[in-house]
Amino acid sequence: QLQNDQIDQMELDQLLSQRDPSESWEIRFEELKEYKRQFGDCAVPQRYSTNHQLATWVRTQRRMYKLMIAGEKTCMTPGRMHKLNSIGFVWVAR
């Protein structure tokens, strides 16, 4: 039997897949802020078992940032970059 938090995450993922991409971005950003509140940083592990989707999203933000810096087409915007910087986002994984 799945734990309640796993079921909740599955339901959230299903809802996110039906939403506007910018709305999904905001939801993940809120999850990242909650992660920071719990752990004191924004360095979500790549294999974060509690929320795989957050770990993937963080990795995607880093990739989009690199593309933006390289002048490539990306969904990273200055506004999103500012929001991530405002909470101490780690742009380079260690």
Image (spheres, helix red, strand yellow):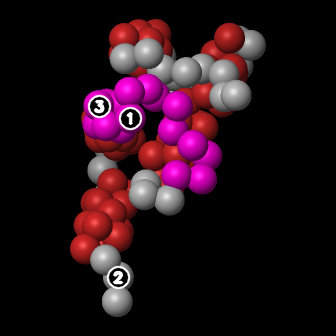
Q: Which residue is mark 2?
A: 2
Q: CA distance from mark 1 to mark 3?
A: 6 Å
Report the mark closest to the observer, 3 or 2. 3
Crowding around mark 3 (Cα neighbors within 10 Å: few <14, some 14 to 19, many 20+) is few
Marker disc for residue 48: none
Asked if the stretch drawn in magenta spans residue 41, the answer is yes
In what quadrant of the picture does the N terminus appear?
A: bottom left
Q: Which residue is mark 3?
A: 37
Residue ID at (60%, 37%)? 59
Nearest to N terminus: mark 2 or mark 1 = 2
- Mark 3: secondary structure: helix
Q: CA distance from mark 3 to mark 2?
A: 26 Å
Query: Disc 3, disc 2: CB below 8 Å?
Result: no
- Mark 1: secondary structure: helix
Q: Which residue is mark 1?
A: 39
**Which amino acid, mark 3?**
Arg
Residue ID at (35%, 82%)? 2
Query: Disc 1, disc 3: CB below 8 Å?
Result: yes
> Is residue 29 visible in this depiction of the protein?
no
**Which amino acid, mark 1?**
Phe
Where residue 70 sits: x, y (%)? 74, 13
Q: CA distance from mark 2 to mark 1?
A: 25 Å
- Residue 84 is drawn in which quadrant? top left
Q: Is residue 4 above or below residue 63?
A: below
> Is residue 19 visible in this depiction of the protein?
yes
Nearest to N terminus: mark 3 or mark 2 = 2
- Mark 2: secondary structure: loop
